[in-house]
Amino acid sequence: MKPREIKPGIYWVGAIDWDRRLFDSLIPLPDGTSYNSYLIKGNEKTALIDTVDPAMQDVLLSNLNQPDFGHIDYVIANHAEQDHSGTIPRVLEKYPGAKIVCTPKCKDMLIDLLMVPEEAFITVNDKETLSLGDRTLEFIHAPWVHWPETMLTYLREDRILFPCDFLGSHLATTDMYVRDGGQVYEAAKRYYAEIMMPFRNIVQKNLEKVKGYNIDIIAPSHGPMHDKPDFILKAYNSWAFDEPKNAVVLPYISMHGSTQKMVEHFVGALAGRGVSVQQFNLAVTDIGKLAMSLVDAATVVLGTPTVLVGPHPKVAYAALLANVLRPNLKFVSIIGSYGWGGKVVEQLAAMIPNLKVEVLDPVLIKGFPRAADFEALDRLASSIAEKHREKGFS
Ligand code: FEO
C-alpha cells in the first residue's frame, strides 16, 4: 500500500501484513494486522511517528521515498516493541542526523533491543512538546499500555492522537478509517483482551488522561484509524470499567467423553437459570476467542479429565493464560472426571494466584457421570446463578 494522505502534510506510510497469523509466537491473528507509521510535515521540521516490523521495512522505506517528503528530522518512538521500533535503525541510516524522540525508559530499551547509539536520542517528559514549525507534537507518558516505556503523541493543531498499541486492533484492511464497525469492534476487543486487559487499572487511568484532549482522529499503530473516536473510546471504557456480566466461560477438555457429558449437562443447567455460557473445547479453540470471552465473564469453570494425577495440560494452559491476562473474574470452579484419583483442584488453584476470585465447590466425579453427579452440577449452576444475582450482574 502506497502512502495515504490523512490531511495536507500528514500521511499514513505504514505496511499492511495480510498474511501474519501469529504474534509473539503466541497470539493468533486471524485477520492479519498492520504496522501503522505516520509522516507529519511541519513548515520547519518533519517527524515520523513509529516505524514498522522489520519484516516489512522495505515497504516503509519505499513509502518514504516520495519526492515531496524530504528529510526526516525526528522519529517519534511511542513504544519500543520491535513491530514498531524494529525499522528505526534503517530509517536512521537513510536520514543521517535524525533524532529518536521517546521516553527515557524507551531510550534504554531501544539501546538494549536495537543497539541504537545513545547520541541518536532526545528524551521527553510527560506533556513536553516538540515544534515542527506550524505543527506541535505533545507527548503524553502512558506507561504500561502495554510495556513500561509507552507514550502517546498528540498533534495539537490537527487534533490527532497517535496512541501506538493503545486503542488499536490487529486487522489488515484497506479501509483507512473504521467502516465495518462490527469487524473492528471484534478485532479491537481481541487486542484489548490479549494485550491490555492485564493492565486494566492502568488502562482506566489512561482513558481518564485522554479525556482532557480534543480529538478528531485516533491513529493507532495497528488497524484502521478512527475518525469517530467515540466508537473506540466507548468500547474501551466499557471493557475497562464495566462490572462483569452474568456470564460463564467454560474452557474444557474431554478425553473419553465423561467430562464432555458433564459439560453438556452443566451448560444446559446454567442456560436454564438465565446465565450466558461460552464453552471452549481447548482441543480446537482459538485462544484469542477465549481471551475475548474473559473480558466480560463473571465466572470461569474449568472442565478437565485427570491426566497423570493433574489437570489435562491444555486445561492447565488455559488456567495459566487466565492468570496472566488478569480478567475481572469473581468466581472460579472446576468440573471433571477421574479414573482413580488425583490433585486436579490443588494444582489448578495454584496456577491462578493473580485472580482475586471466590472458588466455588468443584464437581469432580469418578468415571462416567451418573444421576447424583448431574444433580451436583445442577447445584453448582444454581450457586453461580445466585452469586451473579447477588452481585447484580446482568
Ligand atoms: Fe504493537 Fe506492543 O507492539
Image: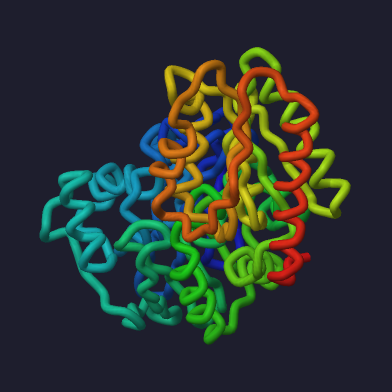
In depth, the one of 319 and 336 nearer the eye is 336
Quadrant containing the N terminus in the rendered view: top right
- Residue appearing at x 53%, y 31% in the figure: 315
Please say if 165 is above or below 162: above
Residue at horizontal 25 percent and vertical 50 percent from the top: 92
Residue extending furthest bottom? Answer: 212
Q: Position of residue 152 (x, y in %)?
A: 43, 69
Whether residue 50 is visible to the viewer of this picture, yes or no, is: yes
Residue name at image x 33 percent, y 78 percent: 130
Using the rendered view, name the quadrant where residue 6 is placed.
Answer: bottom right
- At 84% from the left and 46% from the top, the residue drawn is 271
Residue 165 in sight here: no
Q: Is residue 362 above or below residue 150?
A: above
x and y percentages locating residue 339 in the rendered image? 56, 16
In the rendered image, the vertical position of residue 186 relative to residue 122, given as above or below:
above
> Is 39 on the left or on the right of 360, as rendered?
left
Spot occupied by residue 87 in the image (x, y as percentages of width and height): 33, 43
What is the x, y in percent for residue 367? 64, 18
Q: Name the residue at the top extreme.
A: 256
Is 366 on the left or on the right of 27, as rendered? right
What coloring was used for the rendering?
A: rainbow
Q: Quadrant of the C terminus?
A: bottom right
Q: Is residue 154 above or below residue 189?
A: below
Q: Residue furthest right?
A: 272
Judge left or right: residue 60 versus residue 278: left
Q: Nearer the viewer, residue 335 or 95?
A: 335
Q: Quadrant of residue 377?
A: top right
